[in-house]
Every structure is written in C-alpha cells, then in structure tokens.
Amino acid sequence: MNFFANVDWVEIALACRDTLAMLGGSLLLTILFGLPLGVLLFLTAERQLSANRAVNAVLGILVNILRSVPFIILLIVMIPLTVALVGTSLGVAGAIPPLVIGAAPFYARLVETALREVDRTTIEAVQAMGATTRQIVVRALIPEAMPGIVSGATVTAVALVSFTAMAGVVGAGGLGDLAIRYGYQRFQTDVMVVTVALLVLLVQILQYAGDRLALRLTRR
C-alpha cells in the first residue's frame, strides 16, 4: 500500500513556494518596521538618550495590544485593511499585511531587549566624543547588539512559519492551507504528515542559520 497515495508533489512544491514567499516578504517588512520601533522603544525609555515617558508609554501600549491579539483573530479583523492595502485578502499578498502587523511588535520587543544588554560604558564613550543620538545608535548600539538582534530575527522567523500555517485558514495558500484542506478536512493523513515534516524542516534550517550567524557576529 502506498502511504503517499494522496500526496500531489506538484501541489506540495507550489505550497512550499507560497510559504517561502510569505515568510520572506513578511520577515523583510517585519525587520524594516520592527527594528526602528525597537530602537525607539529603547531610546525613549527612562534614563535613556531620548527619554520621553509619554511617547514610550504610547508605543508600549500599542505594541502590547498588537502582541496580545491571537494571530488567527488578527487575520480576520484585518481583512478590510488588507483589502485596502493590497487589493485582496487571499493568497500570498493577502497574508503579508497581517503577518507583518502580528510579528513586528514581537520583534520590536526583542530588539529593545538586545539593546538593553549593551554595556552603558560603550554608549557613554561614544557620547563623550560628541556623537549625536543617531550616530550613537548607528555606530555603537546596533553593532554591539547585532548578535541579539539577529537572534531575535531568528525567533521571529520561526514564529512567522507558524503564522503562515495559520494563514491557510483564510485562504492564504502555502503548506498550512494544504494541511487544513486535505489533512484535516479530508482526513488525508499522508498530506498532513508531509506538510508538517516540511514545516519542521524549514524551522530547523532557519534556526541553524540564525544561530550560526549570531555566533559569528558574537566572535567578532
């Protein structure tokens, strides 16, 4: 008996492509939005370079609200906004806005944590040389915190893999969509096993690559 009788390998390949497209697009945008947000959270915190309690409180509340909303609910709530932004709530394009909104606040907090671990003497030394806040961030804070920032991006990428799987519920495509439509709704266990195995493999590759990069940056 052929255990993989229900598996359409062409469809699996297309689903892998969609998952990688969702992951790549959303991770890039998450870093582009989450990194500045994390830096701003750090700078406006108490006893930091640009301490501002009001701004920090507003940003903190916004980030915490977005982080607390379950992603499956965020997918549904954001459908009108997603349609307004990209013209559809389906497929890879329709999945990327909620993926970014769900992951960027999470990544911002990881960036903020990485920046807090930078030795204050490094910041004070650069500040004593007359550097502006922007120069301190670019030349001292981010380079010193880079291993932690990369590790945070790795954790975020792994979380995004899970998010892309959940996005299949609203027709985003990808491996999660196959697992739901065939593995769950049609009770095709072989399809479920293949999709889960591929998602696990993707997570392992992301984690390994991220750990190796963070280790190289730490040694520098």
Image: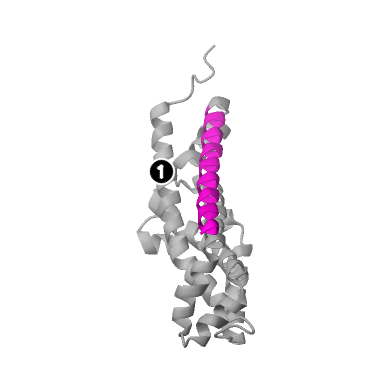
Q: Nearer the viewer, residue 21 or 145?
A: 145
Pinpoint residue 88: horizontal percent, then vertical percent: 38, 55
Picture quadrant where residue 9 is located: top left
Q: Residue at x 54, y 71 (%)?
A: 38
In the rendered view, would you say 187 is above or below 176? Answer: above
Q: Is residue 163 visible?
A: no
Q: Residue at x 43, y 61 (%)?
A: 29
Q: Which residue is identified by label 1?
A: 18
Where is residue 212 drawn, in percent x and y?
A: 52, 48
The magenta span reads: 191-220
Q: Residue at x 62, y 86 (%)?
A: 53
Report if residue 172 lies within the magenta region: no
Q: Residues within 10 Å of mark 1 (few under 14, many from 20)?
A: many
Q: Residue 99 location, x and y as percent?
A: 49, 56
User: Which is more toward the observer, 180 or 200?
Assistant: 200
Please state, as top left, top right, bottom left or bottom right, where the N terminus lies in the image.
top right
Magenta span contains residue 196: yes
Instruction: Please tell me whether residue 171 is drawn above or below residue 66 in the rendered image.
Output: above
Residue 212 lies, with reference to residue 152, above or below; the image says above
Q: Is residue 211 left or right of residue 135?
A: right
Q: Residue furthest top?
A: 1
Residue 117, given in percent of the width and then of the height, sits at: 62, 69
* Image side of residue 190 versus residue 84, left or right: right
Q: Which residue: 49% across, 40% down?
A: 177
Residue 154 or residue 58, whichever sits in front: 154
* Count of marks, rendered view: 1
Residue 139 visible in the displayed image: yes
Colouring rule applied to residues: one colour
Q: Amino acid at mark 1?
A: Asp
Local secondary structure at mark 1: helix
Dominant SS in magenta: helix
